[in-house]
Amino acid sequence: MADERRDSQGKVKQSFFAKQQLISAAKTTFQHLAAAMKNATLYPESHPTLLASAEKLVIKVQELLADRKEVSFYLVGGELFFETQSVPVDLSQSLLMEQFVSREIGGIVFKPGLTPKEIIQFAGLMNKEVAFFVSAGGVSAVFAQEQISHIELHRAIIVDKKTGRTIKDGKKASASFTGAIDTVKQMIHAVQLDKAVNMRKMNTTVQTMVDDILENRDAFIGLTSIKMYDEYTFAHSINTAILAISLGTFLSLDKHQISVLGMSGLLHDIGKVSLPIEILNKPGKLTEEEWEVIQQHPVEGALVLSDVQGVTKMAMVTAFEHHQHGEHKGYPQVDGGPRKHLFSKIIALADAYEAITAARVYYRSRTPPDQAIRILLKNSDGIFDPILVKAFVNMIGIFPVGTLVKLDTGEIGLVVHQTRDLMRPRVLLLTKFDGSEKETGADISLLETASGQYVRSIIGTIDPHVANINVKQYID
Amino acid sequence: MQNDANQEELLTPEVQDVMRNFVAAIRAVKLYPENNPIYSQSIKKSFEALDHFLKTTPEYHLEVQNTYFTYHQIPIGREAQLDKALIQDLFAKGVREIIFKDGVTEEQLIILYRAFALSPDEIAMKSGISSILWENGSTHIKITESGLDEIITTKTARSEGTTPAKTPTRTLDPSVGKKEIVFGGRTLVLNDLMDNPVGFGASMLALATQTRGEHESIEDRLYALYQEGGRKIREEDPDQSDILFEGLAKSVLSLEPPYSEKIVAGKLYRELDEESVSEQKDTPEEHVPNELHEILTGRFSNAWTVPQVQELLKQSSARKIVSPPPPFHPSTSATLAVIPLHPHLADIARDMAEYTLEEMEALKKMSTLGTESDIIEASVRTLVLLLLLVKDPHRLGSEEKKIELFSRVVRQLEDMLSYLLMKKNYQLAVLIGQAFRMPADPVFKPRMMEAIRKTVSRSGIIATLGDMRHFIKGSSDYNAAYAYLSLMEREVTRALLELLAEEKDRVTRQFYLEIAKEIGKNQIKLIGERLSDERWYFVRNIVSILGESKDDQAIAFLNKVARHNNFRIRQEVVKGLISIGGNKAATLLATFVNDREADIQLMSIRGLAEFRGIGSEVAKPLVEFLTGRPLKKNNQELTLEVIRVLGKIGGADAGTVLQGYTRVKWWRSRTLQMELRSAALRALEKIKRRESDGGRATR
């Protein structure tokens, strides 16, 4: 599959691999810019060291220009972006970012024809005091005067990023979620009564979920953390689907692949409808034999789904495979060991994460949200695909959306968005813990620095129930 | 009709123009390849007409009837018979409504027309035309398809004939009847538990509503009351506790669904689950996902039975009573309990930050999965595994049920096989063919045999052979197709023999012959039966196949045509015998020294010279041949060959005859005699050497 392909609107869609390569190239380019800026403070303009660093930067920019008309970096809320991709930066580059922000620079654009001389001039100018620009009539005026024509600067972008953006047409994430639960309930009840199931409706539900998650993944990830015990049996399928779809979007799979994942997530436990109710509702511990019956559900699910038209056959495959974990592990056992499809691995991972976080919520164990990630990592050799686990952790974060965190400043924040640094998400600062209505606090990025040091860092997590915070109202 | 014609007049020329071009484009995409100018021109015209229309009207709305379109309920193009088949096709594919919205692009139209051109199977595989449009981001075209109500059928163990155990009707000891439960000042009579559990439940509900705390829900209070009731029964009436708890359970189940569900699912089962968790040795999270989670996510049904709820209530009443929630005290950020971070968390975050090259390569490969071909491959493998598992004798369920499920999976595989053959995907077709031929218990065998019978059609075999002709020999496609045919040796051999007989083209015949030689190796009897055919060229091919089999069984059949009138056939027999080798073949081959064709004689003798390890009895016809053979120039070559061969395989008898060739008679041609003498002496030397070492030397 090509790293880039065009969709029906002619928009270029990059694979995950291509995106990672781009981010890596952008990071290196910014590092060279930082090096050039630093060298400009240490050496005169004609010094070979400064010239060399400027040339390196020009080379990197030219490499990037091979596929685009200009090379654009943006500074938004303490984060560095290359076009629309967030670029991880070290603390050492944060000083440079602070420097730009202090001069109200929110974007730097390099154009074709850039020369090392312009870089050196630019670096020299950037190292001047802010007052210099004010007296000279602004940055643009100074640039024009110095004949720097291949570097453009943009003003700082003020971000007012609210948590839980509403989805198109004013529909909230929770409404989509509830709608999906209703659809799953209808399906399950129809199956139980041997009535017809509208598979078109299921397909539409999945497609809607995919569109909604592409629009606002954070809100849906946050909703999966709010376990509704009463509805959990049905919500589990939705949560698994959401997590699988989210990982699919993170991996830049195409819509078809993502919708296949979504349907597989929704239907992975359908085999349990065939299990004897007496065993599922048994008011006591199951015997070995009864547990073996429960373990039949992947086969039952696959048998059910094998005969259904209008639903992707991958749902049958994932229903069958999602509990297989290598030879002699998991179930069902097959001769020669299982041959688990990637999508089954994704569903297994989503299912497991769901189970771990449910246990934490339902059984009131005082375990922090990040423990789920550590458990997945612990089991990534043998049960889960380690590469998928890594991608999943990067997608969901060590502190997932909806986590309440304590900062070293004494403040409390609610995680609302992941950044490239998993230890430094965006948080909404909260001040009221009296059960009152939702507050609109400051939305800050923990990547923000001052004098080269991070302004805030996470030192612990807090149970939202203890804090009497209704997380849902912030996510939705 | 007249009415329709009148109605159609109400449609503007633009509407009709769009319709005409739309239909033309659908037809063009269906009939012509992409590089045909008609294909691209039709699409372009269709787009232009539609685009022009949508400049003044927000949408173009077509309904698809059985044999005609309607535009906002007005029939359109009803008279055009040409369109009828096309519209019927769309209708059969489930299309009922098509709406074009302003902003539709030519690319979106292409996607739509291509989707219309797919077969119903292909459309079903992609979950419908609207799914195809959605996946391709075609947001300006809306398709409504017919309600595809699919039945997911599954029978729970309950509906398989098992019925829930009937709760025996029990009666309360009259001495207990008048006893009461006192709840905070209110009194409820225990007798009601059995006589009128519904009433008891209603009373409990009323009591809960009246006595709940400020921050307490009705359900929580109701639950607390039932717990208290259960506790009182245990403490005050242990002898009658069974029957009383039964009544208590009935009263819970008689409550309105929100309350009964809350108590049973939300409280009773939750307590049970929490207790299970606390009893586990490992922390629940270490087991991913754990048994309890599997059960929790399987409780779809709220068809709880009285015995189940009874047991839960008993267990619950033995536990500590749930207190109402404590009064709420607001916190500050300083007073909130903080769970410190794990010491390795920062390291984990750092490890997650970068992907290694190997990880990136693996992620790159991931993007190729989930495509149609990949899904089909995974489906085939899963269905084959299901076939094995359904047959498992340890699996629960009646034999009838197992056969039904087995049959269902086989049917799926049959459908899949048809699709794969249509797509020429022999790699997967072989898997299914092999699955059908797996060993199976007698009870499943008939269905397997039926599946095999359905898949070994002559037309299918011919189609596969046709595909093989287009594959490069030795390629994976070719080998897969061959492997697929090899599963049906007998049927394929039969088909090939027939094709060989009918085929006029020499190259094609050669192709069939090559395949038949390989596949027919184990079908000697079937092939040999065709030797009596009147067509010499057919018989020659049969002989060729028999020869290539290298099977001793073929010799008996070759013997039948060893004296065939047609020398070409006899030649082929000789070649075949040489190919087969061995004593038996050599014996028959030796008789060809007396063939009436000199070429065949020579061929057979030279062939015999290449044999190894044959007995001297094989030489008998050669000895007889040489005895009294006239000395002629024409005979010389063959005589020399026979002498040479006798040197290799002859015994004492041969030696005697060869001695005669060592004496030169003055009245005969000296040159010829000297040549023969020289050959005879060499041959005698070999015979002597062979006889002196006891025949140990390789002949």
Image (tube, coloured by chain):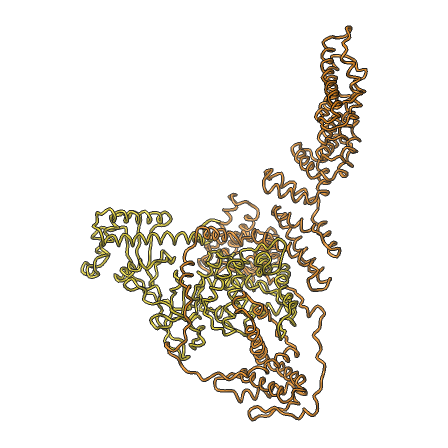
Residue at 42% of width from left, 76% of height from top?
A467
In depth, the one of B154 and B640 nearer the eye is B640
Q: Is residue A289 visible?
A: yes
Q: Is residue B9 visible?
A: no
Image position, residue A320 (x, y; %): 60, 59
Q: Colour of chain A?
A: yellow
Chain shown orange: that is B
In depth, the one of A289 and A358 nearer the eye is A289
Image quadrant in which you'd find residue A450:
bottom left
Image position, residue B382 (x, y; %): 61, 55
Q: Is residue B559 left or right of residue B134?
A: right
Image quadrant in which you'd find residue A87:
bottom left
Image position, residue A218 (x, y; %): 44, 65
What is the tally of numbered marks visible in this picture? Answer: 0
In depth, the one of B2 and A473 nearer the eye is A473
Q: Is residue A321 left or right of residue B631?
A: left
* Quadrant containing the C terminus of chain A in the rendered view: bottom left
Image quadrant in which you'd find residue B597:
top right
Give the vertical position of B63 relative to B569 (above or below). Answer: below
In depth, the one of A328 and A440 nearer the eye is A328
Q: Is residue B354 left or right of residue B545?
A: left
Give the vertical position of A383 relative to B330 (above or below). Answer: above
Image position, residue B140 (x, y; %): 48, 58
Give the vertical position of A339 relative to A398 (above or below). Answer: above
Q: Is residue A111 left or right of residue A200?
A: left
Q: Residue furthest left?
A: A135
